[in-house]
Amino acid sequence: MLNVLAVALGGALGTLLRYGAGLLVHAPYGTLLVNILGSALMGLLMAKFSAGAISEPARLFLAVGVLGGFTTFSAFSYDVLQLVLRGAWAQAIFYIAISVMVSLAVCAFSFYIMAR
């Protein structure tokens, strides 16, 4: 139950930070800013976690909660990094291409359907 609470509280904080960033820097540059900042923070955080310097509840609060609420792009970036670090370059490129192309296509399609 502590893990669920850590994720929920972190997510609430992350969404508030995301909302604040959007007020300061308007789309699409606000989104770009949080994606880049969130990805940088995810890299720092996961390096510390991998070294044993951050506990699992702290990782859940910060990575899944705060950064997940701030931007899910940080999780996407870390997923790609893990594939690259394993030497799975083809999988990484495929994952990037499919994630971006399919997400854009589905967004456009659903927008088109609802706008009719």
Image (spheres, grey):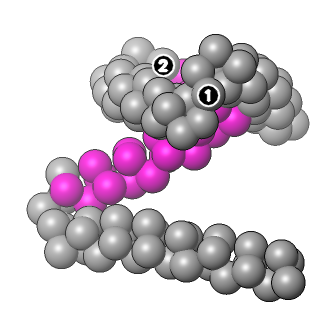
Classify residue 26 by image quadrant: top right
Residue at x 56%, y 29% (from the top left corner): 30
* 21 vs 81, nearest the viewer: 21
* Amino acid type, mark 2: Ile
Which percent across, then down, holds residue 33? 47, 28
Which percent across, then down, holds residue 40? 37, 26
- Mark 2 / mark 1, whichever is N-terminal: 1
What distance separates the C-alpha of mark 2 from that of mark 1? 33 Å
- Quadrant for the N terminus, please: top right
Q: Which residue is mark 2?
A: 54
Which percent across, then down, holds residue 56? 58, 30
Q: Secondary structure at mark 2?
A: loop
* Amino acid type, mark 1: His
What's the magenta region? Answer: 55-84
Q: Main secondary structure of the magenta part?
A: helix
| Number of the label disc, if any, that sits on residue 26 | 1
The answer to whether 1 appears left or right of 48 in the picture is right
